[in-house]
């Protein structure tokens, strides 16, 4: 019988921002593939709903309240995750915040740091905690960051968001090189336009649809479920030789 490279039975996955949107799409697919899944988030109601969804697939499901931009929160959340599930095999740094549409000339340092605090500092703190555990435990592991096409393309009124997502890619590549000797792989996922609470205000605009959707060869917006297979692949042995890479999932928007 051929080994199923995508069977995650016995695997423990951590997904920050895993209680909604892309994070929940990835967490659901990981649970469906057999993994035990812990989601970190700041909205306890959504986290409870996410746990109920994930538990339907038969594995262990856990939610931990965590603001990834707070070092103490991350340390406490990682300790709680390890106490409950015993280990973390894959860590998806997905928690993020969007822009407020502030013009660059009016953007304050406070606004800039509001975004980078979560999107970049939060990913750093999360990855560091996960990598420390993986190295101490031995046996390798997986780090995956949710970046964005904004890291590669110009985004007006989104300099802070673009900077955070571009910095995330660079950090992931550095981790891929430094941590390879410990058997740890690190990759990034770059979403295009995806239907979520973060993009409702933009994608709901008819003018925006006319201007942008015509540039998406797939002729639709992405959905959180579109990111599930990539998460399973990156967490699984199937991606054993892939590290320091960027997986673009955008319906072709970036090439058209």
Image: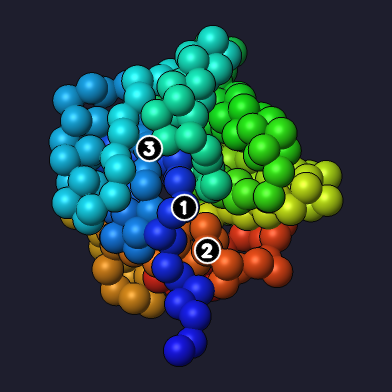
Residue 3 lies, with reference to residue 238, above or below; the image says: below
Query: Could you say whether the residue bearing mark 1 is in a helix, strand or loop?
Result: loop
Image-based side of 31 in relation to 117, left or right? left
| Disc 3 packing (10 Å; few <14; some 14–19; many ≥20) | many
Q: Provide residue 99's location: percent of width, then percent of height.
A: 42, 31
Image-based side of 196 in relation to 106, left or right? left
Classify the position of the N terminus by image quarter.
bottom left
Q: Residue 192 falls in which quadrant of the image? A: bottom left
First in sequence, mark 2 or 3: give its number: 3
Q: Residue at x 72, y 38 (%)?
A: 135
First in sequence, mark 3 or 1: give its number: 1
| Residue positioned most to the front | 1
- Location of mark 2 (residue): 236
Would residue 152 be seen by someone viewing this image from the given angle? no
Query: Could you say whether the residue bearing mark 3 is in a helix, strand or loop?
Result: strand
* Distance from Cα at disc 2 to Cα at disc 3: 17 Å
Question: Does the residue at mark 2 contact the one at mark 3 (Cβ under 8 Å)?
Answer: no
Q: Provide residue 165's location: percent of width, then percent of height.
A: 58, 41
- Location of mark 3 (residue): 38
Would residue 234 be seen by someone viewing this image from the given angle? yes
Q: Provide residue 25's location: percent of width, then percent of height.
A: 31, 53
Q: Residue 41 falls in which quadrant of the image? A: top left
Question: Does the residue at mark 1 contact the one at mark 2 (Cβ under 8 Å)?
Answer: yes
Q: How many marks?
A: 3
Nearer the camera: disc 1 or disc 2 = 1
- The label shown at residue 11 is 1
């Amino acid at each position: 019988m051929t080994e199923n490279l995508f069977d995650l039975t016995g695997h423990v996955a951590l997904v920050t921002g895993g209680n909604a949107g892309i994070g929940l799409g990835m967490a659901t697919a990981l649970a469906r593939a057999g993994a035990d899944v812990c989601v970190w988030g700041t909205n306890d109601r959504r986290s409870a709903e996410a746990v109920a969804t994930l538990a339907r697939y038969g594995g262990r499901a856990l939610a931990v309240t965590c603001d990834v931009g707070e070092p103490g929160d991350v340390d406490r959340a990682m300790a709680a995750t390890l106490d409950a599930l015993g280990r973390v095999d894959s860590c998806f740094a997905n928690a993020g915040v969007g822009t407020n549409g502030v013009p660059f000339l009016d953007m304050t340092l406070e606004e800039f740091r509001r975004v980078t605090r979560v999107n970049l500092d939060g990913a750093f703190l999360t990855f560091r905690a996960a990598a420390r555990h993986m190295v101490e435990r031995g046996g390798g592991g997986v780090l995956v960051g949710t970046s964005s096409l904004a890291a590669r393309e110009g985004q007006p009124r989104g300099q802070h968001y673009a900077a955070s997502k571009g910095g995330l890619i660079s950090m992931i590549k550095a981790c891929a090189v430094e941590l390879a000797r410990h058997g740890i792989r690190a990759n990034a996922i770059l979403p295009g336009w995806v239907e979520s609470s973060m993009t409702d205000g933009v994608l709901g605009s008819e003018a925006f649809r006319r201007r942008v959707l015509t540039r998406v060869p797939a002729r639709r917006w992405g959905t959180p479920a579109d990111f599930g297979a990539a998460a399973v692949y990156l967490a699984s042995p199937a991606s054993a030789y892939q590290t320091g890479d960027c997986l673009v999932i955008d319906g072709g928007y970036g090439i058209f």
